[in-house]
């Protein structure tokens, strides 16, 4: 077992905010604050902190040297050198000059040529975006209110640089029209600072022919050379034209909340579009890295290259570990290390339906059964969705009398999914909780209560004690694994225990709200934890679910995408540890979760599960 430093300074994806400011510009510090604000706003949406860096693409050619600090090539190459596989570039410019367009394209193309296994993503700004448009409206409104000039007596003159291509100048005319109609101004025009047609001095002369109070609106984000030049030309014109003395120029957008929201929305959209493409894109095997099995701790990562028996404390989160598992030998070693070694071993699988990727599939089950040190007894109950749906009856009241059909449908499910083949291969046994309950084979609730008393466990739903098969008590003290899948921040190993309730529908146990449901799940976990030696195991051995309203796959819970071959597991003594790590890996803030509020009140937890850091590059795989 070799120990390496965890790459917390590098992430799988890096984010760059591109500005036309120079690093020596007084507004550079404001732009850095803007980048930090965007990152803070994106964190709860993405599930991780994007750590946005600032890069410069100045319109001044002397600042376009590729070797200058903070230039786009330097920042991009630094991100890739620090281990980023994907770089997202967010241009925060309202106009690209011809030189900037060329420099930007050359930089992106050069990076792609030098790093064929890396990806660069970017989008194009839209100056007519509703949020950006509203930022212009606010600046105009502040000026008109200060000067006490009604919009109906005002003429708007949008001042753009005009040093880009014809498309960018056409966008300026579109923005002018939108501002004109929204403000209700008397008239509106466009002027350019760096284009031969409709230059600002000429447009000012034309405006003087019309009896309006003209307001110049800079099509710019920051106060700088262009805004100063705009005000200088206006000042010179006012000295020569008395009717222009009341004219003014409003401030540029600057570091506003609307600008931050506009950029935050673009970043999230760019990220989601990338994730959707990566979901359906099958990369060439030529460029795939075969990574070793690795444990990821809060301070260090550990590559598992031999069968050591212990894991350093700084590679764990209290009672829980988080690992990439690439082979059965390593998987078995981790199970043994954490204390799974009884014979038999009871495994609560997740077989709730046919929705691809959401249940314990043959690949994951085969890997688990191959790694277990003892015989496996699989536990699950009947459910309403594990069938072909040809029969119609009231599941709440008529399930038992239709049990033959339900049982046949379950066997068909095991055959269709290939799960039966895996069970036969490993000679695994299967105990259906619902069938045991219907057959009257559950233990005396008083016997279950005795186990709770011995362990000092209290529950608020004593009727749950009626649902424990007697055969489980005959093997009390054995290991119990709740084997759940990465498929959402709360539907993990504790929620998996909900399937140990015998009723196929279980509607009454869902209760009126999430808190009630969470309480039932926690109490079922506590009951089984009093009888057995419990372990939580949340897996993405084959695929993981990422919920997405536009996802390719559909289930009764909504649309989703699948993350192929993550190989990640979270494993813990007791169930909560694995769930809390798996939830955090999926971007959940577990300190603000109603479900985990119940978990914290139901179990004694170590603080590491909530507070110790998880590397962003791991969260980005699932969030």
Image: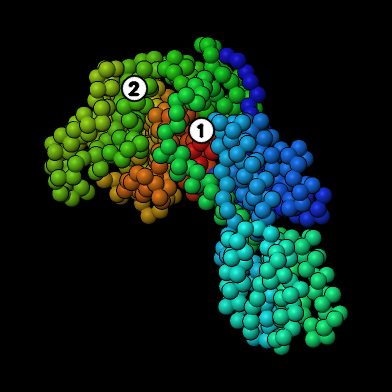
Which disc is residue 366 wearing? 2
Q: Nearer the viewer, mark 1 or mark 2?
A: 2
The residue beneath circle 1 is: 577
Q: Residue furthest top?
A: 307
In the rendered image, residue 497, in percent from the top left (x then y), is placed at 37, 36
> Mark 1: few, some, or many residues within 10 Å (few <14, many ≥20)?
many
Q: Indicate left or right for 197 with 337 as reference.
A: right
Give the quadrant of residue 353.
top left
Which disc is residue 286 wearing? none
Q: Earlier in the sequence, mark 1 or mark 2?
A: 2
Helix, strand or loop for disc 2: helix
State the residue at coordinates (48%, 19%).
334
Give the quadrant of residue 311.
top right
Report the Cα–Cα distance between label 1 and label 2: 24 Å
> How many discs mark residues in the rendered view?
2
- Evaluate whether residue 406 shows in this view: yes
Marks 1 and 2 close (CB-CB < 8 Å): no
Q: Observer-nearest residue: 345 or 240?
A: 240
Helix, strand or loop for disc 1: helix
Locate the N terminus and report the quarter of the image it occupies: top right
């Amino acid at each position: 077992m070799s120990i390496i430093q965890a790459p917390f300074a590098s992430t799988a994806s890096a984010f760059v905010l591109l500005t036309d400011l120079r690093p020596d510009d007084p507004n550079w510090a404001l732009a850095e604050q803007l980048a930090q604000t965007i990152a803070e706003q994106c964190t709860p949406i993405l599930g991780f902190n994007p750590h946005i860096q600032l890069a410069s693409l100045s319109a001044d050619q002397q600042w376009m040297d590729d070797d200058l600090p903070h230039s786009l090539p330097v920042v991009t190459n630094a991100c890739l050198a620090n281990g980023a596989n994907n770089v997202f570039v967010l241009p925060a410019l309202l106009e690209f000059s011809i030189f900037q367009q060329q420099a930007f394209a050359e930089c992106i193309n050069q990076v792609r040529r030098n790093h064929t296994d890396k990806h660069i993503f970017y989008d194009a700004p839209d100056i007519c975006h509703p949020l950006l448009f509203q930022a212009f409206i606010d600046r105009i409104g502040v000026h008109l209110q200060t000067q006490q000039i009604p919009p109906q007596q005002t003429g708007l003159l949008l001042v753009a640089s005009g040093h880009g291509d014809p498309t960018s100048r056409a966008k300026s005319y579109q923005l002018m029209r939108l501002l004109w109609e929204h403000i209700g101004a008397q008239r509106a025009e466009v002027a350019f600072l760096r284009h031969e047609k409709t230059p600002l001095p000429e447009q000012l002369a034309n405006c003087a022919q019309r009896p309006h109070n003209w307001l110049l609106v800079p099509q710019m984000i920051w106060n700088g050379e262009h805004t100063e030049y705009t005000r200088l030309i206006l000042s010179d014109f006012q000295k020569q034209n008395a009717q222009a003395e009341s004219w003014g120029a409003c401030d540029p957008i600057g570091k506003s909340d609307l600008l931050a929201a506009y950029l935050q929305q673009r970043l999230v959209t760019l990220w989601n579009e990338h994730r959707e493409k990566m979901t359906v894109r099958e990369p060439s095997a030529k460029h795939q890295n075969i990574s070793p099995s690795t444990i990821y701790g809060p301070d260090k990562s550990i590559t598992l290259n031999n069968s050591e028996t212990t894991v350093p404390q700084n590679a764990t989160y209290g009672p829980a570990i988080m690992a990439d598992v690439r082979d059965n030998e390593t998987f078995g070693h981790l199970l043994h290390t954490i204390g799974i070694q009884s014979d038999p071993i009871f495994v609560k699988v997740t077989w709730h339906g046919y929705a691809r990727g959401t249940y314990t599939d043959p690949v994951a089950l085969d890997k688990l059964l191959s790694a277990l040190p003892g015989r496996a007894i699989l536990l699950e109950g009947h459910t309403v969705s594990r069938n072909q749906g040809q029969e119609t009856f009231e599941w709440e009241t008529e399930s038992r009398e239709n049990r033959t059909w339900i049982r046949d449908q379950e066997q068909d499910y095991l055959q269709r999914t290939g799960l039966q083949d895996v069970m036969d291969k490993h000679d695994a046994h299967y105990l259906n909780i619902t069938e045991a309950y219907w057959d009257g084979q559950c233990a005396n609730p008083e016997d279950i209560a005795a186990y709770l008393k011995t362990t000092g466990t209290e529950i608020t739903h004593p009727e749950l004690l009626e649902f424990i098969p007697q055969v489980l008590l005959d093997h009390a003290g054995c290991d119990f694994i709740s084997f759940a899948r990465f498929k959402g921040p709360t539907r993990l190993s504790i929620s998996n225990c909900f399937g140990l309730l015998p009723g196929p529908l279980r509607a009454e146990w869902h209760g009126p709200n999430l808190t009630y449901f969470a309480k039932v799940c926690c109490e079922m976990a506590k009951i089984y934890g009093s009888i057995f030696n419990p372990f939580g195991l949340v897996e993405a051995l084959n695929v993981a679910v990422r919920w997405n309203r536009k996802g390719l796959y559909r289930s009764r819970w909504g649309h989703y995408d699948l993350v192929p071959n993550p190989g990640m597991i979270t494993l813990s003594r007791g169930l909560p540890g694995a769930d809390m790590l798996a939830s955090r890996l999926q971007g959940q803030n577990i300190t603000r979760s109603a479900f985990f509020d119940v978990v914290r009140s139901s179990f004694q937890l170590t603080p590491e599960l909530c507070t110790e850091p998880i590397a962003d590059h791991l969260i980005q795989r699932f969030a």
